[in-house]
Image (spheres, helix red, strand yellow):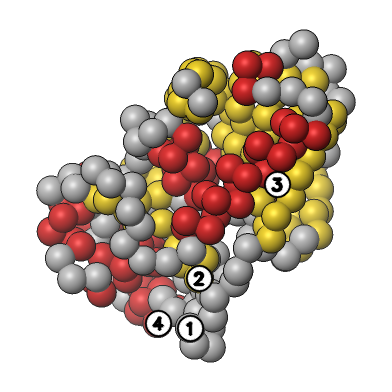
Amino acid sequence: MPVIAALDQGTSSSRTLIVDLQGQVLASAQREFAQHYPQPGWVEHDPLDIWATQSATFTEALARAGLGLRDVAAIGITNQRETVVLWERATGRPLANAIVWQDRRTASICAELEANGHAPELQERTGLLPDAYFSATKLAWLLDRIPGARARAEAGELAAGTIDSWLVFKLSGGAAHITDVSNASRTLLCNIHTGDWDDALLALLRVPRAVLPVIVPNCGALATAHLGGLEIPITGMAGDQQAALFGQACLQPGMAKNTYGTGCFALQHTGTQ
């Protein structure tokens, strides 16, 4: 019986659910991982901890279901949004801890953007206001402070992305560097009218296009996981709150949901706009 492996990488834990084709959860596994607070207002995760706990829960959940990798028809990924990882393409080695969505270290950069009158342009292009919550200023901060990182990023030696990108890179053995539209939309770099990275915002926020993943849809043949000598298609990706919107069956424009976890989030289905 083919099953779907649903990987749920959250802020404080990683989880995997094994789901049959009727949508029934056959088994699950969850592991917490360390939170790092280098100084007040800073929040970090070790990307290798995220990968280790996520891959371990995948193995555990399959075992609890009495199944193996050969039974997995497809993998879906949902993840904590806005958290940024920077790593080497050739080795997969992270250059620093991930900067978490809660982190406020770039608040002064965002205040400067607003003071310089960039907020209307950012909102018009991305739907977002300048805030340290979003990914772009976190990535710029890393590129500024890791010696040689900006030049290496511009040369295509480095990769950056949100947690979905990091997991796909690891699952694919480094073959795929992608992000889905919902995660991209939370970076302050994605033009919501074109669905692509915005060159004007890349220049404003000093992020090289070469370091960023390719933006792909939420579903389809997105990438291929190479696990245990098998190839398993990765066919679904969405940021956790957008995924929850549809998980709560808000399928018609105007429907909304709240979820309560590390934070409280309200999202509404807005239709085609």
Q: Amino acid at mark 4?
A: Ser
Q: Nearer the viewer, residue 136 or 30?
A: 30
Q: Secondary structure at mark 4?
A: helix
Q: Earlier in the sequence, mark 3 or mark 4?
A: 3
Residue contact at pointers 3 and 4, CB within 8 angstroms: no
**In the image, which is nearer the foreground, mark 4 or mark 1?**
1
Quadrant for the N terminus in the image: top right
* Residue 147 spot, x, y in % from top left: 18, 71
**In the image, which is nearer the foreground, mark 4 or mark 2?**
2
Q: Residue at x 75, y 55 (%)?
A: 266
**In the image, which is nearer the foreground, mark 3 or mark 4?**
3
Which residue carries the number 2 mark? Answer: 44
Q: Nearer the viewer, residue 51 or 267?
A: 51
Which residue carries the number 1 mark? Answer: 38
Q: Amino acid at mark 3?
A: Arg
* Mark 4 → mark 2, Cα distance in angstroms: 18 Å
Q: Amino acid at mark 1?
A: Pro
Task: Tell which residue pokes out farthest to the bottom in this image.
Answer: 40
Q: Identify the mark at residue 108; answer none if there is no mark.
A: 4
Q: Examine the rendering and report whether any part of residue 245 can be seen.
A: no
Q: Earlier in the sequence, mark 4 or mark 1?
A: 1
